[in-house]
Image (tube, helix red, strand yellow):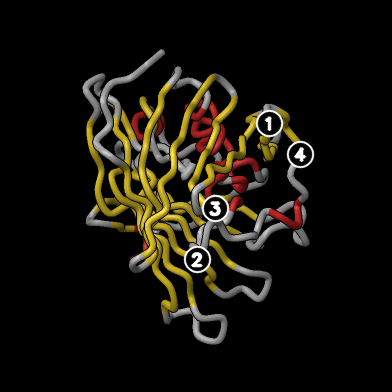
Amino acid sequence: MKNWIKGVIVLAFAVQGYAGAQEGVRPADDLLQEMRQMMVSQGSRDVMGSIRKKSLKVPFSLSSRGDTIAFQYKQGDAWKRFDVHIGDRKAELMFVEGGKAVVMAPATYTQTIAGTDVTYEDLSLRFLYWKGGVILPDSANSRIKGRDCFIVQSSNPSPGVGQFATVRLWIDKENGTVWQVDGFGRDGKLKKRFTITSIQKLSDGAWFFKQMKMEVRDPQNDQRTIALDYLEMDDIPNRKK
């Protein structure tokens, strides 16, 4: 499979091209670097979808333009926007209103969006820029959906910022698909789990997630899910501008 699913909300987990299986195991930071590069090498793409929590359905759009990914979501009758500016060392979050961009305060990263459990940090996948990641040893937990995966673990370089102290990503050894992301709090307990439940192939041969499930875990018992949200994409035509 030549193309692979990338990590974004962005949310977007759409990527193309992966050579790791043929080259052997490389450092975790190299795998994450490839994912970051793919986030800005897809050209221009516009997609529509919704965040669903029980009966609540929040429409949103995602537009990729070079090193900027723009998110818009509907809150009440108004559309809100924030951008993710992707640099070599970090992803910067910006509120955009009236054509003006303002840097988002770190304390805002964990605010939820339009009554859902999805935060700005969740959509931006800020943790892809954390350095010093490691590939954990293979174990029974390395298989997701019957696929053998690398488990990449990264630690937050600024532990006081954001909701996660560490994250783990399950990356398919054969085709590079990111099947699952686990985010752990400062107490070491699992806070959120993101799982790709279905994918779709675009007419240009790229792959994009169709549905992603986000589980919020009980702070007292991280084996118990207390909230479920779904990111669901509309059928995506091959639109590039």
Q: Which structural element holds mark 2?
A: strand
Amino acid, disc 4: Val
- Above or below residue 234? Residue 56 is below
Tell me which numbered mark, 3 or 4, is placed earlier along the sequence. 4
- Name which residue lies at 78% across and 61% down: 160
Tell me which numbered mark, 4 or 1, is placed earlier along the sequence. 1
Mark 3 Cα-neighbour bin, 10 Å: few <14, some 14–19, many ≥20:
many
Front position in the image: 108 or 197: 108
Where residue 134 sits in the image (x, y, percent)? 57, 50
Tell me which numbered mark, 2 or 3, is placed earlier along the sequence. 3
State the CA–CA distance, disc 3 to disc 4.
Answer: 17 Å
State the CA–CA distance, disc 4 to disc 1.
Answer: 14 Å
The circle on residue 98 is 1
Q: Quadrant of residue 32?
A: top right
- Name which residue lies at 52% across and 21% down: 65
Front position in the image: 17 or 52: 52
Tell me which numbered mark, 1 or 2, is placed earlier along the sequence. 1
State the CA–CA distance, disc 1 to disc 2.
Answer: 33 Å
- Above or below residue 113? Residue 91 is above
The circle on residue 122 is 3
Q: Which structural element holds mark 1?
A: loop
Tell me which numbered mark, 3 or 1, is placed earlier along the sequence. 1
Do the residues under discs 2 and 3 have CB atoms within 8 angstroms?
yes
Front position in the image: 166 or 150: 166
The image shows a total of numbered marks equal to 4
Where residue 62 sits in the image (x, y, percent)? 46, 35
Residue receiving disc 4:
103
Do the residues under discs 4 and 1 have CB atoms within 8 angstroms?
no
- Above or below residue 118? Residue 125 is above
Q: Between tags 3 and 4, which lies in front?
A: 4
State the CA–CA distance, disc 4 to disc 2.
Answer: 25 Å
Residue receiving disc 2:
192
